[in-house]
Amino acid sequence: MGRLTGKVAVVTGGSRGIGAAIARRYGAEGARVAVVYKAAAEAADQVVTDIEAAGSEAAAIRCDVAQTSECNAMADAVAAAFGGADVLVNNAGIYLLTTLGETSEDEWDSQMNTNVKGAYFTAQALLPQMMARGGGKIINIGSILGETGLPASAIYSATKGAIKLMTKSLALDLRPHNIQVNTLSPGIVESDMNTEYRAEFGRRDAALLGRFGGDDPWMVPDDLAGTAVFLASSDSDMVTGANILVDKGYSAY
Ligand code: NDP
């Protein structure tokens, strides 16, 4: 029996990176998993195959979380496939390197609409299902950049600061419904998202800050999975409105 046996979990951005690692771990812990993706259909199918091979059930569901109508359609698909959701991981996100002098309005809108608006309306779409099931868990993926700055990251930082405080207010709103809402904030994790950052700035910043020596590797997506299981399980029933940093000590400097 896994720690999430009997639960249905929806992981947005479940096709790649951190979301794929969380989706696989949830499956291994017995959850049935909706692997939500925007474009990477093959990668999402592979995550589904891996979860099924490990003995649980999964389904890939396409949804651009920046489009509220698609969030609602995704929730309907989750209900059709699994009967409803107990856990939502709002993980879908984008990170564009931007500088004030050169940023376009599109770059602002796409990051805000995916990282903040998407998380809010995905939660709204799944809320009736959680209420009908007597409670639930919403895990919003924040970032170390919700705590501190990085070069060329002002918009992304703003989205992750917003997620952290949105989480706190939602935690209060949803407490009467037995739905716990928390932020899980990773440090820098090796993924497709930050290839450009790591190549252009990462090592230089790391060296400047003395945070990572030459042999000290970045975290990998699976490093987040254990905490994501905790936040989805009954072990965290008394934890709500919290921001849990899993950052290898980055913020401790
Ligand atoms: P990746 O770029 O590896 O994966 C991003 C995922 O989000 C993909 O599955 C992608 O789906 C999905 N996605 C992007 N836009 C949308 C959208 N509009 N609708 C639905 N899905 C979408 O990112 P990471 O795994 O690195 O990041 C995951 C989360 O963790 C993000 O919220 C990110 O901000 C956060 N984070 C990451 C850190 C890092 O260092 N990597 C550090 C701190 C936080 P598809 O491929 O199908 O398009």
Image (tube, rainbow, N blue to C red):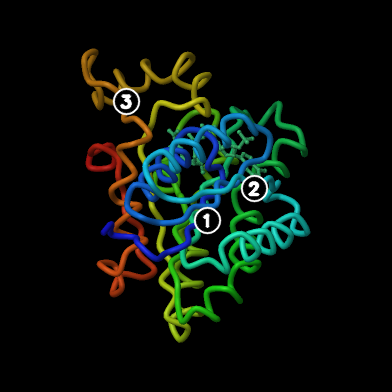
Q: Position of residue 204 (x, y in %)?
A: 37, 16
On whether ligand 1 comes within 8 Å of the CB at mark 3, the answer is yes
Label 2 or label 3, whichever lies nearer to me, is: 2
Sequence-wise first label, 2 or 1: 1
The quarter of the displayed image where residue 31 is located: bottom left
Q: Are marks 2 and 1 in contact (CB under 8 Å)?
A: no
**On the picture, is 87 further left or further right than 99?**
left
Considering the image in quadrants, where does the C terminus appear?
A: top left
| Tag 2 residue | 61
Q: Position of residue 167 (x, y in %)?
A: 47, 64
The quarter of the displayed image where residue 251 is located: top left
Is residue 24 placed above or below 166 in the rendered structure? above
Q: Residue at x 58, y 73 (%)?
A: 129
| Tag 1 residue | 10
Q: Position of residue 135 (x, y in %)?
A: 45, 77
Q: Amino acid at mark 1?
A: Val
Q: Residue at x 34, y 60 (%)?
A: 4
Q: Amino acid at mark 2?
A: Ile
